[in-house]
Image: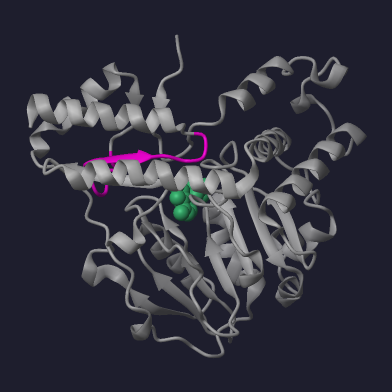
């Protein structure tokens, strides 16, 4: 069967070249007679893979030397809890901006272990806009300010890092990391689950300013301590080696594409094509405030929701798959991560126009 055009929100499409390389060397990796899954994480060959992946990620994001890069586990959700445990002590306030489902979940997990303060909550605008910066109730002495750079479910993106003074910025970039250049030096900590723009789910990448690693309370168990993982090169215990290897292949692929300037321009173009198609039509609509529309997740609804099922059925037949919106919001959602080609987006836009003509 030919590959479909996969708009899944995550786990999501990976570059075909990466899958083919992994397939080609699956049973005999680098002439070892073994797969990369079957070798020790402490072997020279795997250490080379691990180090190259980190070096390539550092090059892509221009990560400054005073930042550690960690390859950890547990999905982004585990780090909703580990970040407050590592970056603060129980008496410090923590600032959380709530702009949708994921930042809300992050704040709830943090609230289980620390005293958090929600600086603003977009509920009044149904999370379709970011609360005005002037209305945020910031704590000047917060241990950090947490936000979700891209709300995957609603398709709401905060395109520029918020200005919060000297308080370190902590960003959940799970669904936007590597989609364009970012100035890492603006952040205290960036984290991202891998299953959108990086590789297999379970792996989580953290980029953290080294001085912040010293904040963890002494009684935090070693396995939960970022500083302990950093000291061991993310090999405190057995890391998810296959995921790390695939991430490395994706980073090398991104470098071959010309890096994040190039990929960012392409992503912008892909998103614009889709939003323009939605805005020009009276049949499709996207409710997110324009300055905050996501480049990666594009939800849209049909003027006649009774046609949702038919839309999905016909799309599937045309090879366009996983367009159903999140169960909490309904409608459609096209996730157009780095590995989604411009041709894939064009195919969707053409299908939408055709469907509208026939059914609208
Ligand atoms: N944050 C964001 C922005 C996400 O999109 C997701 C998953 N879709 C998560 C966190 C949770 O990731 P995980 O399921 O890997 O814990």
* In the depicted structure, whether residue 212 falls above or below residue 182: below
Q: Residue furthest top?
A: 1
What residue lies at 80% left-to-right and 20% top-to-bottom? 29
Q: Is residue 326 visible?
A: no
Q: Residue furthest right?
A: 44
Q: Position of residue 194 (x, y in %)?
A: 58, 44
Does 332 appear in magenta?
yes
Q: Main secondary structure of the magenta part?
A: loop
Q: Position of residue 163 (x, y in %)?
A: 50, 79
42 horizontally vs 353: left or right: right
42 horizontally vs 229: left or right: right
What residue lies at 22% left-to-right and 22% top-to-bottom? 313
Q: Is residue 261 visible?
A: yes
Q: Could you say which quadrant of the image residue 217 lies in?
A: bottom right
- Along the viewing direction, whichever of 94 and 21 lies nearer the viewer: 21
Q: Position of residue 237 (x, y in %)?
A: 78, 47
Q: Quadrant of the N terminus?
A: top left
The colour mode here is one colour
- Along the viewing direction, whichever of 62 and 88 lies nearer the viewer: 62
Does 201 appear in magenta?
no
336 horizontally vs 67: left or right: left
- Along the viewing direction, whichever of 111 and 260 lies nearer the viewer: 260
What residue lies at 50% left-to-right and 47% top-to-bottom? 265
Q: Could you say which quadrant of the image residue 190 lies in?
A: bottom right
Q: Quadrant of the C terminus?
A: top left
The magenta span reads 325-339
240 horizontally vs 77: left or right: right
Q: Position of residue 264 (x, y in %)?
A: 52, 48
What residue lies at 67% left-to-right and 35% top-to-bottom? 256
């Amino acid at each position: 069967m030919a590959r479909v055009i996969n708009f899944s929100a995550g786990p999501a499409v990976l570059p075909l070249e990466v899958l083919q390389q992994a397939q080609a060397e699956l049973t005999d990796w680098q002439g070892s007679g073994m797969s990369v899954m079957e070798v020790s994480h402490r072997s020279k060959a795997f250490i080379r893979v691990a180090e190259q992946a980190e070096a390539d990620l550092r090059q892509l994001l221009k990560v400054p030397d005073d930042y550690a890069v960690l390859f950890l586990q547990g999905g982004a959700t585990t780090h909703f809890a580990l970040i407050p445990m590592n970056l603060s002590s129980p008496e410090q306030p923590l600032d959380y901006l709530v702009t949708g489902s994921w930042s809300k979940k992050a704040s709830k997990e943090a609230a289980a272990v620390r005293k958090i303060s929600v600086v603003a909550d977009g509920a009044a605008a149904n999370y379709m806009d970011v609360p005005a910066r002037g209305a945020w109730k910031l704590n000047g002495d917060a241990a950090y300010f947490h936000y979700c750079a891209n709300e995957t479910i609603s398709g709401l993106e905060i395109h520029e890092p918020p200005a919060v003074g000297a308080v370190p910025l902590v960003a959940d970039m799970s669904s936007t990391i590597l989609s364009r250049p970012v100035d890492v030096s603006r952040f205290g900590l960036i984290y991202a689950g891998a299953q959108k723009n990086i590789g297999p789910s379970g792996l989580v990448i953290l980029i953290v300013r080294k001085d912040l690693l010293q904040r963890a309370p002494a009684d935090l168990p070693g396995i939960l301590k970022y500083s302990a993982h950093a000291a061991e090169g993310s090999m405190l215990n057995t890391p998810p080696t296959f995921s790390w290897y695939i991430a490395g292949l994706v980073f090398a692929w991104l470098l071959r594409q010309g890096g994040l300037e190039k990929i960012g321009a392409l992503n912008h173009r892909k998103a614009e094509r889709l939003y323009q198609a939605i805005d020009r039509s009276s049949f499709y609509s996207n409710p997110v405030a324009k300055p905050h529309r996501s480049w990666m997740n594009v939800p849209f609804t049909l003027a006649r929701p009774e046609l949702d099922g038919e839309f999905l059925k016909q799309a599937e037949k045309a090879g366009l798959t996983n367009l159903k919106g999140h169960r909490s919001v309904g409608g459609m959602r096209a996730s157009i991560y780095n590995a989604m080609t411009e041709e894939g987006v064009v195919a969707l836009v053409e299908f939408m126009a055709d469907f509208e003509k026939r059914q609208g």
